[in-house]
Amino acid sequence: MRRAVEIAGRSVEFAASAATPRNYRVLIGRDLFEDFQRVAAALSDALDGGAEIPPDILTVFEDIAWCMAHEATPRGVPDTPSEWLEALASLPIRVVFPALELLWLDNLTQTVHPAKKLERPRAR
């Protein structure tokens, strides 16, 4: 699955696939599922109560965004999150993270439905 997000007047392509969690673990060294939950919780708290998003959560968000951008265009994205961030004017978490979350959730949905419902074996 792919999705383009406009960031500072520039279209940035992101992608998610079955390989995304493995690639994230190899490239970043953390669990993608846990990191998505941490960022979602922190963003929800910030939106609900006006709390600041902790710097470590912003780093996690940047890592997720970089990994998904790297999957979309491996040759067009620098080799490290820091280099990629330097090329962007900004990376607004309140705009980009919801788009990444939807991309990931769309990737998880079943796209092929069984043609025929399998019957369970009958007990003898």
Image (spheres, rainbow, N blue to C red):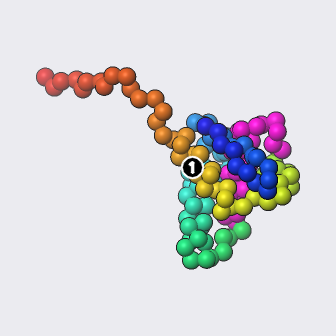
Tell me, yes or no, if residue 3 can be seen here: yes
Quarter of the image for the N terminus: give it.
top right
Residue at screen point 79% across, 49% down: 10
Location of residue 26 in the rendering, given as x and y in whole percent from the top left corner: 69, 42
Q: Is residue 70 magenta?
A: yes
Q: Give the x, y percent position of residue 73.
A: 76, 37
Closer to the camera in the image, 24 or 93: 93
Q: Quadrant of the C terminus?
A: top left
The foreground one among 123 and 107 is: 107
Please tell me whether residue 81 belongs to the stretch shown in magenta: no
- The one nearer the camera, 114 or 83, is 114
Q: Residue furthest front?
A: 9
Q: Position of residue 21 (x, y in %)?
A: 61, 43
Q: Do we see residue 22 in this rendering?
A: no
Residue stretch rendered in magenta on the structure = 56-78
Which residue appears at 61% of the width and 61% of the height?
Answer: 39
According to the image, label 1 marks what residue? 102
State the image quarter where residue 2 is shown. top right
Amino acid type of the residue that numbered disc 1 sits on in the rendered structure: Leu
Q: Secondary structure at mark 1?
A: helix
